[in-house]
Amino acid sequence: MDPIVLDRRFRVWRYGVGHSQLLLHSHAGAADAEHLNVLFEDVRAVKLRSSYQPLILRPADGPARDDILDFAGLPERHQHRFLSLTLSTRPEIGFVLCARVTVLAVSKTNGQAPLRAWPDGARVVHTLHYRDQVP
């Protein structure tokens, strides 16, 4: 799985323990036609900074993946069902252990609130699912 590089400033916008969702948001600047949302679902562990620029979603492998899984305390029999993603070029800057990630773009001219996780008229830019990772 290749890294996804989003060369914008993203902020942590919402984390809901009840639905196990994390939302990172990048507001459209003057040169941007769209707001961007990154929705992580079935989140089992996170380590976050307040913002990322750029945001780089990179699969963790080897020792970094092992460290994330150890941190999460996830039983070995379930580990294959989750993505271990770093949010930068360095795992210590942030990671998310989740089942699915969706990057959504929302036109800043469509009149919809861009800060909802999945606003009306959103366009799916990327989707990563645990089934996409190489075992």
Image: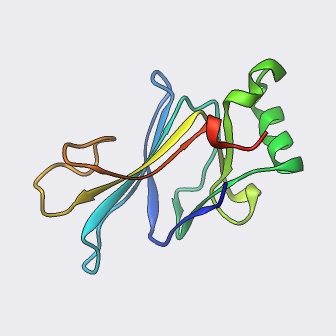
Determine the residue positioned at 21% across, 61% down: 107
**Above or below for 97 versus 62:** above
Residue 42: x and y, percent? 54, 28
Quarter of the image with the C terminus in it: top right
Quadrant position of the N terminus in the picture: bottom right
**Could you say where residue 32 lies in the image, as x and y percent from the top left?**
29, 74
Q: Nearer the viewer, residue 5 or 29?
A: 5
- Residue 80 in picture, x, y percent from top left: 74, 30
Residue projecting furthest to the right: 63
How many numbered discs sit on the rendered protein?
Answer: 0
The image shows residue 9, relative to residue 102, as above or below, that is: below
Q: Which residue is found at the position 68% from the left and 28% from the top? A: 81
Q: Residue furthest bottom?
A: 31
The image quadrant of residue 39 is top left
Horizontal side of 44 relative to 114 (left or right) equals: right
| Relative to 70, residue 47 above or below | below
Residue nearest the viewer, comparing 98 with 9: 98
Which image quadrant for residue 79? top right
Question: What colour-coding does the image apply?
Answer: rainbow
The percent coordinates of residue 34 (x first, y second) are 27, 65
User: Could you say which is closer to the camera, residue 29 or residue 124?
Assistant: 124
Residue at 83%, 33% in the rendered image = 70
Q: Residue at x 45, y 24 (%)?
A: 19
Relative horizontal placement of residue 132, taking residue 63 as reference (left or right): left
